[in-house]
Image (cartoon, grey):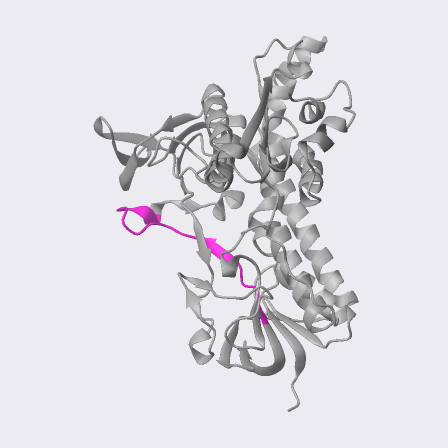
Amino acid sequence: MSYDYDLFVIGGGSGGIATARRAAEYGAKVGVAEVGRLGGTCVNRGCVPKKLMVYSSHFPGLIEDSRGYGWTVSDGQFDWPTLMNAVNGEVGRLNGIYQRMLDNSQVELLPHYAKFVDSHTLMVGEKTVTADKILIAVGGKPVKPSSIAGIEHTITSDEIFHLPEQPQRLMILGGGYIGCEFACILNGLGSEVTQVIRGDHILRGFDDDIRAMVQESMQAHGVKLLTQTEPVAIAPGEDGLTVTLKGPEGEETVVADAVGLAATGRRPNLDNLGLENTKVEVVNGAIAVDQYSQTAEDHIYAVGDCTDNINLTPVAIQEGRSFADTVFGGQSKLMSYENVPTAIFTTPEAATVGLTEAEAREKYGDAVKVYRSKFRPMYYVLPGKEEKTLMKLIVDTNTDKVLGAHMVGDDAAEIIQGVAIALKTGATKADFDATVGIHPSSGEEFVTMR
């Protein structure tokens, strides 16, 4: 049978575009449907604009620190619209780069929603197209808990980048990494931030030492954290939003500005996709795929957040390229989910790769040995600050293999990225010990722990 495309990709995010370009390199005729701006969540509503805001939030601390190094600097004045215009200008620039990449790869962009008519046919806008292979790369979207009265008065992490004014009093619901990152960003920019979590600790799923140190540091920097607390109702008033909270001491109300940031998770963006017209299976709200990103329909594949595996942009890109290499490049490639590094761009920053201590002890029992180092980096000596860095290695003493590496502190993501290479290649503690450190640096602690 003849089809309009060898591959049609639903979704123009990082994973979808990377797949489309790789398949086109192999000579495939490729189309992409994307109704929004190219780049997906990461470029438009996530990694990129968020990291730019993180940089901005650090300047008050840098100005303060500079005085310890002999500089006389005014406190400065922050302007929210200037930052937002600059951030969104950079996002627009990146959108253009993605468009040029598709054009240079001779990938056709259809700026519409796509919906399955049958397993080989899609309705894209007002046009019907067919494809031999179809890739679903529609990402995820924020979730607002419907059980909270007045939840419609909140915004999600998607909208924070388009607020015309900085919220001077911000409440964040949820203790995941997105909520924690925005708590630190707005706190650094001068907002009064209250964060509400149901449990005792933020960052569920990360190593317990990482969770504890980030939480302690966030509170020390001024974030007000309400634990064992749940929002009951949100109502607009003359002075902003009145949020009713239920905590250990009963109910209380907190007034925030005209915005409340709901940071309570994301889910695959599968609405109106027409999956019921295919054999594609959805399990727990996510598209079920095998190790080759193949769905129950053997010519339909899915990558990225819509599979709810590891929801990271580089993972989606790697999954998509592995699929293209396998299906169009004649190379059987599998995405490895072992030792995938990740970072939390809080203040202080955290990063991790491999097993947490709890995961390692569950798997290897008493054979696990943990190495820790907690210290004040040299940078903070002259400013007179008691900022701490934590580094942690988890080792299987039966094999001496390093199972996990975790860090809280400045440049944690940059340092763990290099450590991740060592773990990916199966490095042992002896390999770390045999490596000469760069002195003076924080990174050398990973090769000097005893």
In reply to whether residue 308 is colored magenta, the answer given is no
Quarter of the picture holding the C terminus: top right
Residue 136 location (% of width, % of height)? 56, 68
Quarter holding residue 17? bottom right
Q: Quadrant of the N terminus?
A: bottom right
Q: In the rendered view, would you say 239 is above or below 450?
A: below
Residue appearing at x 59%, y 33% in the figure: 397
**Is residue 165 in sight in this rendering?**
no
Q: Is residue 150 magenta?
A: yes
Q: Position of residue 310 (x, y in %)?
A: 54, 52
Residue shown at the point (61%, 52%) measured from the top left: 313
Q: Position of residue 417 (x, y in %)?
A: 68, 39
Q: Residue 83 sits in which quadrant?
A: top right
Question: Left or right of 336: which side holds 305?
Answer: left
Q: Quadrant of residue 132?
A: bottom right
Which secondary structure is most common in the magenta stretch?
Answer: loop
- Tell whether 210 sits left or right of 131: left
Q: Which residue is depicted at the point 79% across and 66% down?
A: 104
Residue extending farthest front: 398
Question: Measured from the top left, where is residue 350 in percent x and y?
Answer: 57, 32
Q: Looking at this view, name the residue that lies furthest to the left.
A: 250
Q: Is residue 218 above or below residue 121?
A: above
Q: Is residue 116 above or below residue 399?
A: below
Which residue occupies the foreground of this view, 87 or 49? Answer: 49
Residue 156 in view in this figure: yes
Q: Nearer the viewer, residue 173 or 89?
A: 173
Q: Residue at x 65, y 86 (%)?
A: 3
Front position in the image: 25 or 362: 362
Relative to 450, say whether 199 is above or below.
below
Would residue 442 be found to the left or right of residue 185 on screen?
A: right
Q: Which residues are magenta?
A: 135-152
